[in-house]
Amino acid sequence: MLVVQVAALATVAGTITLAPVDREDWICFVLLVGAAVAHLEAASGMERIRELSSEGSPHTHLQSVWFFAAVLLLPPPLIAALLAVSYTHSWLRVYHRRAVAHRKTFSLATVVLGCAAAYAVLSAVYPGHGEPFATALDGPLGLATVVAAGALYRLVNYGLVVLAILMTNPDRPSRKALGPASDQLMIAGAVGLATGFAVVLTTRPWWTPLLIITVLALHTGLLLPQFRDASRMDAKTGLFDPTFWAELTADELDRARRLNGRLGVLLLDLDLFKRINDRHGHLAGDAVLRAVADAIKHSVRGHDMVGRYGGEEFAVVLPGLGADDVVATAERIRAAVADLRVTTVDLDGAQRSIGGLTASVGAAVFPEHGTERTTLLLAADAALYEAKAAGRNCTRIAGSARPLLPGARMPDELPAARQPQD
């Protein structure tokens, strides 16, 4: 990792005076930075989940559209500046400074070297070209040059990342380190979009907003539904299903251990929910579950992970929060549930407005109440039983060494529903 980062720094230093930077270059740079930032903002939540899910294999994202377009449009100093801005922005906005720093700097270094390799191919084919390379791409030679530059860009970046994964995870199957084959097709598409973007920007600059929108639409409109299906979303609430939520919790715990960080877990149970089904029907109960799910999502941060844990139970992972902030979040959720008025259809077909909902919440914090997923969830579950026993509609946080209450279950069982304690 250190060798790759030193090589990247040397490459930036050695190419800083390779080509002059003029006014048009700065305009293209600002446009590419704006597109890269807007792209990350639009897809930040999904990218964080995708990155967690790809632990142990390369994380491929469509920022390569803007990176490869920069190779075709900008001189080397501005290419490096664009990469630095994009990775800094992702560190702050996508990963909320909770990613492992040396991994991200290594990834940045591999992309710097990949862009440098692609730039070297273009320079070899079009030596002494004073304009952006995008203006010179024409005919079979231009196509072959773009293909060669794109292939080398991917090979350097991908090859170095795979090598690092293999060296740091010798006990894992090497096939996992390669990632899915579809990632290569994704990068090929990114290179194609980048080339089209660069050519349009140099020949028809007023058309570039259409291509920026196209990239955003492809990412959020096509990849997001596909990823939702793969991530096993709960059909009734749109939240993560119990199995996938548990997997994400384990990944976040691993990250908290590596960073010596904190992590909170909430288990929330709707009080007396069976009465809603008995009085108004199961369709009304489903409407209440959807409304509560939305209330929880709007009461937490964008990178917190909300799942459906059981029938009328919900679970939330709160990365980076200590006990006080976890309890404050639980109380904010509880207040949001209490404020709900859900309009639905009653058993007789008439519209009804259901209110007066309450929830009991159990909270636990890593590492005080548990250092493994099972022990942490058991602690939160025991705290939830305490909240029920205290009269419902309240929050309880786990004790650091409190025994399990009678009836508490192993969280890994993840039942379809827990009988409400009416």
Image (tube, rainbow, N blue to C red):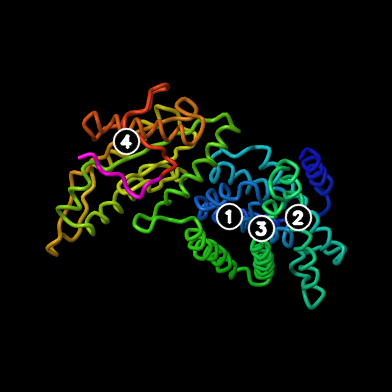
- The region drawn magenta spans 414-422
Foreground mark, 2 or 1, reads 2
Foreground mark, 4 or 2, reads 4
Q: Nearer the viewer, residue 15 or 90?
A: 90
Foreground mark, 4 or 3, reads 4
Residue denoted by label 4:
361
Question: Residue 97: x and y, percent?
Answer: 57, 38
Height in image: 220 above or below 105?
A: below
Q: Nearer the viewer, residue 235 or 331?
A: 235
Residue at 69% across / 70% down in the picture?
Answer: 199
Question: Residue 196: x and y, percent?
Answer: 66, 70
Which of pointers 2 and 3 lies earlier in the amino acid sequence?
3
Name the amino acid, label 2.
Cys
Indicate left or right for 203 with 226 as reference. right
| Residues under numbered marks 2 and 1 in contact, where contact means CB atoms less than 8 Å apart | no
Q: CA gap, disc 4 to disc 2?
A: 50 Å
Tell me if mark 3 has few (under 14), some (14-19) or many (20+) residues whose alpha carbon lies within 10 angstroms of its own: many
Residue denoted by label 2:
115
